[in-house]
Each structure stands twice: as C-alpha cells, then as structure tokens.
C-alpha cells in the first residue's frame, strides 16, 4: 500500500512528462515554494525525477531605479556645466551625492579646484558621451556591455540574481488506484491531541532534516554594507586609490614591518589571534627580512627572530595592507587606502567586538608634515559628515608624532575611533622610502557608523532582526540624502 499526501498525488498526476514546477503550482493555485517538501518526498520515494536549471538575470536595485530615472550623480553634475567657447565649467554642490559624483569622475582624470570643475570642450564632450552611454545602459540592462554591468554591480546599482527553475517528471507508474491511499499528513500535534489520544488516528509526517526550507530575503539592503561602500566612494573621490590585502597575515607585515618589537604586549596571545596553519604562507622578500630585522636589533637591542616574523596570524590592523603597498611602491607621491576586517580577542560589549572594520590610509610624498596629516584627517571627517571631532596626543610604536581621534556620539559621549601619525624612519627606511614622508592613520568604521547613525551597540551593525534592519536602513537613507557636514570643529 502506497500512502501519499494529496498534494504529492496531484503533482504526480500532472507530471507525465517534464513539467516546470511553477506551472504545476499555478494549476493548483499555490506558491511554488509550498510544493518543495512534496517534491522532495516524491524524489525520496522514487516517484519523481527532479532536475534544476539556473537562470541568471541582472536587475536594478532600489538605488539603481532612482539613478535610472534621475540620472547618475556624475552625469547630472557634468550636465549642469555651462559651456562658453572652448571651456565648460560646472560648480560642485555640497553633500554626499556630490562626493559620489566626484569619486566616479576621478576615473576620467577630472578633479575639482576650488569647488569648480573646468574642462576643455573636447574633453567635456568625450566624457559626457561616455556617461550618456552608461545612463542608457542603466535603463536597458539587457543590452548593456559587460563592463558597465560589472561597474553597476560594484556601485550597488544592479544586482545579479540567480533563479533556479525546477522540473519534475513521474518515474513510477501506478497501475491500480486501489493500491494508493491519500491522507493529509499531520506535521504538528497540540497538547489536546496528546491528552485525548487523538494523535493515534493521525498519519504523522516524517521529519526530514535534509529538506531545505524556503529562503526569505531581508526586507531592505543591509545598511552597514552600504555604509562601507559609501566610505569607499568618498575615499576615491578624495583622490585615493584602493588596495587590498589578505586576512591571514604573517607577523612580519602585521607587526615587524611596523617596528613593533617581538616582545611588545600587543603581540601576546591575549591581544592577537594566532593561527595553526599548515598551508602555504606568502613569501616575504629576503631583502626586506634582512632590513627590518637589522633595524629591530639596532634600535630595540634584542635578538630578532625570523621564524617568529613568519608566524601566521589573523590581522589585527589593516595597516598591514597599507605597509605592503608602501613596500611595493616605495618612493614617490601617492595616496592609497584600504577597508577590511580585523580581529582582536576583545570582550564583546556595546563598544567593542572581536571582529570589526578599519579604514586605513597613507599619503606619501616629500615635504609632508604633521600639519598636513591633521588637514587630511579633517577633510575625510568632513566628507563623512562628522560634526565634532577632537585630536589627543598619543603614542604608537610606528608613528611620531601621533594622535588619537575622537568623535561625539549622541548618547555614548566622546568615543575614540582611530589613531594617526607620521611613520617613523625605522618603518619607512627598511622599505626603501628615504626621501618621502608618510602620513598614516587607521579608523574604526564600526564606531564611525555608530556615531553617524546614532547606534548604541556595535553588535547591532550585524543585526538580522527585520525590525532593526528597517529602522537602521531608514537612518542610513536619511544620512545619505542629507546635505553633509557643516561647521566641523577640531580641537587638540
């Protein structure tokens, strides 16, 4: 005797040949996802063949739909230019949208001066033509070039969606209907069912942990991911180039190249996650090992251990990535930044987490001073919209002079969110940088997001609670559409 639930029986009846599950669901008047458990049961009992096909589609995000109608920020900014003779001039407005526009215009070599963009007509026409093509591609994704699609995805204007189509086909022919019994299976019992013994009359549904439940998407995009992308756009708009590095580092890049002695307290197990790793570790050039080891022994006066420098750790600071960039590029004039996760054995509380995000940056060039550093920090803080920021003198092994940076949270008070300074010669010279000076800083983006969005608990930045996601996304939207910071005050 074959016992089937009515819904599975109806699926089998309609699947004489390969049928799209969506079509069967439409015939039964139910959503396709409600049939999945019956399809899995039919497959497990050898009654159904199941095959899946993946279909890829590119669709506009909420932000993409706005940009498709209103125009890309960089396109709107250049379209506002007034042209006379051979010159075209556009005034740069204030606010976050202007920063996004400048970040994307920087790819074409466009830089504002004194709040004004000035281009010769030929350059202006060439860039406008390209931006019009991008604008049209955003309105018609099916015909958009691949490179435009990739750019739109990176800018969160378009998302790639994969849709799985499920087909079913009956594989076991039942000749005699009298060998089939149709029952409604019971999947939950009440206390009354158990007390009265009524449960004995039920056909209980076996519980299969292998069946995948339907997925329910978040009600809105995650605000913190969008915030990190926005910070990235602001930094590019300020003329910085993004660099990236590995999460699994060796102590050399995380500590030694930054002139942190091997017996420094920050390198103990209570401050660093050490990793047991038997796989390959990135090779450190021999000349750098020798140069850094020499400066440690000369300045700190101890026996530097090469083996310890090659131990793998989870990076404790994204300065490990910017110091790699400095070693690769050496002398010159450039500005780079990185955004990434770092890991420290912190006690979890409203202000601290064992995993958080840092914005790290360096500015390299001859003649740079501590005053230039404070000016650079001020510029970034203004661009991000921080209203009140203070500097406090500090000490770090790899910078001198150094400062800690604080901002005022609406409820938590003054919160430290970063440190900064001028790299010491003991850091730069072993890497071959002897003429240029290097300004450096590392900011905790989790705390900055808390300050700007009025969030009291760092754990809420990773929330999956739908109500909190809606609330914080609304705050993020208000912040993003605001006019930007004004009257930023710095005190030392």
Image: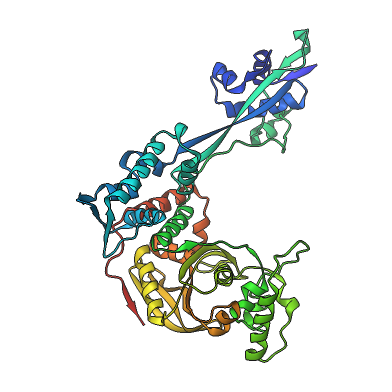
State the residue lying farthest toward the left: 84
Quadrant assignment for the C terminus: bottom left
State the residue lying farthest toward the right: 1
Q: Is residue 85 left or right of residue 192?
A: left
Tell me if residue 186 can be seen.
Answer: no
Quadrant assignment for the N terminus: top right
Tell me if residue 245 can be seen.
Answer: yes
Q: Is residue 376 left or right of residue 352?
A: left
- Say which of 163 and 114 sits in front: 114
Indicate the position of residue 360 as horizontal and vertical percent values.
50, 68
- Say which of 482 and 174 sits in front: 482
Residue 89 image-quadrant placement: bottom left
Q: Write the residue at 78% across / 8% down.
A: 175
Indicate the position of residue 32 as horizontal and vertical percent values.
58, 26
* Residue 345 to residue 199: above or below: below
Indicate the position of residue 411 as horizontal and vertical percent values.
39, 68
Q: Is residue 224 left or right of residue 300?
A: left
Residue 273 image-quadrant placement: bottom right
- Say which of 130 and 188 sits in front: 130
């Amino acid at each position: 005797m074959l016992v089937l639930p009515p819904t599975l029986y109806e699926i089998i009846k309609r699947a004489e040949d390969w049928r799209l599950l969506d079509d069967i669901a439409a015939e039964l008047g139910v959503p396709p996802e409600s049939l999945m458990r019956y399809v899995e049961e039919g497959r497990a009992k050898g009654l159904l063949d199941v095959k899946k096909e993946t279909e890829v589609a590119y669709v506009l995000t909420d932000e993409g739909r706005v940009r498709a109608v209103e125009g890309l920020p960089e396109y709107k900014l250049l379209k506002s230019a007034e042209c006379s003779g051979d010159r075209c001039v556009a005034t740069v407005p204030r606010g976050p949208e202007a920063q996004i526009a400048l970040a994307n215009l920087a790819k074409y070599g466009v830089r504002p001066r004194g709040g004004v963009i000035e281009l010769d007509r030929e350059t202006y026409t060439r860039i406008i033509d390209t931006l019009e093509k991008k604008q049209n591609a955003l309105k018609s994704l099916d015909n958009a070039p691949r490179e435009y699609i990739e750019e739109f995805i990176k800018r969160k204007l378009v998302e790639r969606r994969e849709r799985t189509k499920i087909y079913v086909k009956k594989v076991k022919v039942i000749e005699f209907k009298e060998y089939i019994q149709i029952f409604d299976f019971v999947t939950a019992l009440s206390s009354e069912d158990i007390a009265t013994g009524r449960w004995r009359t039920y056909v209980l549904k076996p519980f299969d942990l292998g069946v995948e439940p339907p997925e329910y998407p978040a009600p809105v995009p995650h605000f913190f991911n969008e915030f990190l992308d926005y910070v990235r756009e602001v930094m590019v708009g300020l003329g910085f180039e993004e660099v990236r590095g590995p999460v699994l580092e060796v102590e050399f890049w995380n500590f030694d190249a930054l002139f942190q002695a091997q017996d420094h307290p920050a390198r103990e197990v209570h401050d660093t996650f050490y990793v047991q790793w038997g796989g390959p570790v990135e090779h450190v050039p021999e000349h750098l090992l020798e140069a850094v080891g020499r400066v440690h022994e000369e300045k700190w006066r101890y026996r530097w251990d090469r083996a310890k420098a090659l131990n793998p750790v989870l990076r404790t600071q994204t300065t490990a990535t910017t110091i790699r960039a400095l070693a690769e590029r050496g002398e010159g004039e450039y500005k780079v930044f990185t955004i990434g996760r770092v890991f420290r054995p912190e006690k979890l509380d409203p202000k601290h987490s064992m995993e958080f995000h840092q914005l790290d940056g360096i500015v390299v060039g001859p003649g740079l001073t501590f005053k230039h550093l404070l000016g650079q920090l001020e510029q970034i803080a203004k661009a991000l919209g921080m209203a009140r920021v203070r500097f406090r003198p500090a000490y770090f092994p790899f910078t001198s002079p150094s400062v800690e940076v604080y901002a005022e949270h609406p409820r938590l008070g003054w919160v430290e969110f970063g440190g900064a300074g001028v790299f010491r010669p003991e850091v730069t010279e072993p890497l071959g940088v002897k003429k240029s000076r290097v300004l450096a800083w590392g900011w905790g983006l989790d705390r900055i997001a808390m300050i700007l969005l009025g969030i009291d608990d760092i754990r809420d930045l990773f929330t999956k609670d739908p109500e909190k996601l809606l609330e914080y996304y609304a705050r993020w939207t208000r912040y993003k559409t605001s006019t930007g910071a004004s009257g930023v005050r710095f005190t030392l």
